[in-house]
Image (cartoon, grey):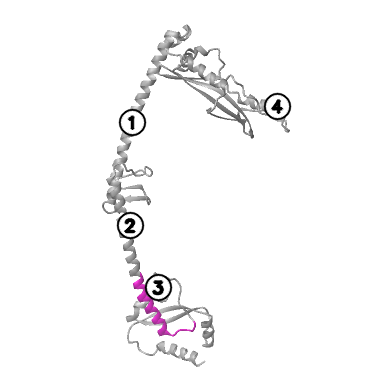
C-alpha cells in the first residue's frame, strides 16, 4: 500500500499546479499505455479505474516536443505508439501497440519510454532507408545487366503484348518478365524500350513483306492451276464442260474431279472407300441386341479417328503393291479408320482403305479406295 501511495504522490508532483507560473511554454499531450492484469489490480489499489487502456493528459515543455507527435487533426500524443525494440539479428523492429506495464507508471517513466522510442525510431528509419537504397541499387544493377544482355543480342525481342513503345516494353528474362520504362529507368535500362520498339517495327516490316511475297506466290500457283485445268478441259473434257470453260463458268472443283478420274483411270472398276461408320455401328448394335433396344444411330453418335496402318495382312500388302505397280510415282498407304460409338467406346469397328496420292501437273490428287479385306464385326 505504501508503494502505491508513493506512485500516486509522484504522479501528483509531476503535474504542475494551476497557480504556479510556467517557466516555459507547455503543450498538453495525451499519453496512452496498456496495463496487464497485474497492472490493473495495482491501478485499483491506487484508486484508479483499473482499465486495460489508460490515457493520461500531460504537460510537455517546448524543449521536449521531440517526444510528441501531432496528427493531421491537431491531436498531440506522447510517442508511446508505435514502439521500437532491438531484436537481435533482426535489428530494430516496429511494434504497432502501446507499451504494457505491470504497474501504473509515473510521468518520468512515460517520458523515458517516449525518449527511447524517439531514438529507436530514428535508427529504425535510417536502417530502412539504407536497406531501401541497397535494394534500389541492386535492382538498378540487375536491370542494367538484363538491359545489356538484351541490347547486345540482336535476336532478343520484347513481348508483343503489350505492344512495345519508345517509352516502355516488357522483356521475358531468366528471372521473369521485366518492365522497362524510359522515363524512370537509368541508362542502359532506359535505352531498352526504344531498341525493343525499333526491332518490333522492323519485324512487322519483314513479316508484311514476307506475307506479300507468300500471297504473290499463292496467286501465281492459283493462276497456274487455273490455266492447267483450263488447258486440260480443252483437251480432255466433255464438250459441255469445254463450253462452260470457254464461258468461264466451269467450277475448278469439277475440273479437279475430272482430272482425278483420269489420273486414277486404271482403277475405275475398284470400289472407292465410303465413310459408312453410322451403318457399321448400327449393325453391331443390332447384332448385340442391347437391353435397351436402342439401334438408331446418327452421325453425331459416331466418332472416327484415322491413321496409317503399321501392320498389314498378306491381302492388304498385295493390294498396296498392286497400286504401286500401276502408279509407280504415286504414294500409297493403308489407312485404318477406327469407328466407335460415343455412348460406349468399347463398341468400335476398324475400317481399312487404300489412300493413293498422285501429282498431276501443279495439283496433288487424292483418292481412297476400299480395302478388299472386310473386317469381321465384333462379337
Tell me residue 184's x, y (percent): 30, 54
Secondary structure beneath disc 1? helix
Q: CA distance from mark 1 to mark 4?
A: 58 Å
Assess whether mark 2 and mark 1 are in contact (beta carbons under 8 angstroms).
no
Q: CA distance from mark 1 to mark 2?
A: 40 Å
Q: Is 145 placed above or below 215 here? A: below
First reached walking from the N terminus: tag 1 or tag 3: 3
- The residue labelled by disc 1 is 210
Q: CA distance from mark 3 to mark 4?
A: 84 Å
Left or right for 338, reference 265: right
Q: Quadrant of residue 195?
A: top left
Q: CA distance from mark 1 to mark 3?
A: 65 Å
In this view, the residue in front, 123 or 58, is 123
- The residue labelled by disc 3 is 88
Q: Is 303 placed above or below 260 here? A: below
First reached walking from the N terminus: tag 3 or tag 4: 3
Assess whether mark 3 and mark 2 are in contact (beta carbons under 8 angstroms).
no
- The residue labelled by disc 4 is 287
**Tag nearer the camera, 1 or 3:** 3
Tell me residue 226's x, y (percent): 40, 16
In this view, the residue in front, 243 or 281, is 281
State whether residue 368 appears in this view: no
**Tag nearer the camera, 3 or 4:** 4
Q: CA distance from mark 2 to mark 3?
A: 27 Å
First reached walking from the N terminus: tag 2 or tag 3: 3
Rendered residue at 48%/15% (across/down):
325
Amino acid at each position: 500500500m505504501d508503494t502505491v501511495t508513493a506512485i500516486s504522490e509522484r504522479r501528483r508532483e509531476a503535474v504542475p499546479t494551476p497557480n504556479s507560473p510556467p517557466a516555459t511554454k507547455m503543450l498538453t499531450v495525451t499519453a496512452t499505455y496498456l496495463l496487464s492484469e497485474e497492472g490493473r489490480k495495482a491501478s485499483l489499489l491506487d484508486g484508479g479505474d483499473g482499465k486495460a487502456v489508460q490515457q493520461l493528459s500531460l504537460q510537455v515543455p517546448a524543449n521536449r516536443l521531440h517526444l510528441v507527435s501531432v496528427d493531421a487533426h491537431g491531436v498531440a500524443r506522447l510517442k508511446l505508439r508505435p514502439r521500437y525494440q532491438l531484436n537481435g539479428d533482426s535489428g530494430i523492429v516496429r511494434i504497432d501497440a502501446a507499451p504494457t506495464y505491470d504497474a501504473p507508471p509515473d510521468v518520468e517513466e512515460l517520458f523515458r519510454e517516449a525518449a527511447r522510442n524517439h531514438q529507436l525510431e530514428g535508427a529504425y528509419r535510417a536502417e530502412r532507408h539504407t536497406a531501401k537504397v541497397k535494394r534500389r541499387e541492386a535492382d538498378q544493377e540487375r536491370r542494367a545487366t538484363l538491359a545489356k544482355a538484351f541490347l547486345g543480342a540482336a535476336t532478343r525481342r520484347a513481348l508483343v503484348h503489350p505492344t512495345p513503345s519508345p517509352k516502355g516494353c516488357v522483356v521475358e528474362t531468366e528471372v521473369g518478365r521485366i518492365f522497362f520504362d524510359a522515363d524512370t529507368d537509368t541508362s542502359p535500362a532506359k535505352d531498352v524500350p526504344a531498341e525493343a520498339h525499333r526491332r518490333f517495327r522492323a519485324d512487322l516490316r519483314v513479316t508484311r513483306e514476307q506475307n506479300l511475297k507468300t500471297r504473290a506466290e499463292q496467286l501465281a500457283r492459283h493462276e497456274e492451276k487455273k490455266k492447267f485445268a483450263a488447258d486440260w478441259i480443252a483437251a480432255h473434257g466433255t464438250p459441255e464442260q469445254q463450253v462452260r470453260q470457254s464461258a468461264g463458268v466451269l467450277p475448278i472443283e469439277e475440273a479437279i474431279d475430272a482430272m482425278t478420274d483420269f489420273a486414277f483411270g486404271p482403277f475405275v472398276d475398284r470400289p472407292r472407300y465410303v465413310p459408312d461408320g453410322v451403318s457399321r455401328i448400327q449393325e453391331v448394335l443390332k447384332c448385340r441386341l442391347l437391353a435397351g433396344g436402342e439401334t438408331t444411330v446418327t452421325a453425331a453418335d459416331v466418332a472416327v479417328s484415322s491413321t496409317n496402318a503399321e501392320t498389314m495382312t498378306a491381302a492388304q500388302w498385295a493390294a498396296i503393291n498392286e497400286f504401286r505397280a500401276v502408279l509407280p510415282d504415286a504414294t500409297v498407304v493403308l489407312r485404318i479408320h477406327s469407328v466407335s460409338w460415343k455412348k460406349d467406346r468399347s463398341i468400335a469397328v476398324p475400317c481399312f482403305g487404300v489412300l493413293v496420292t498422285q501429282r498431276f501437273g501443279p495439283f496433288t490428287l487424292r483418292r481412297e479406295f476400299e480395302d478388299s479385306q472386310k473386317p469381321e464385326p465384333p462379337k
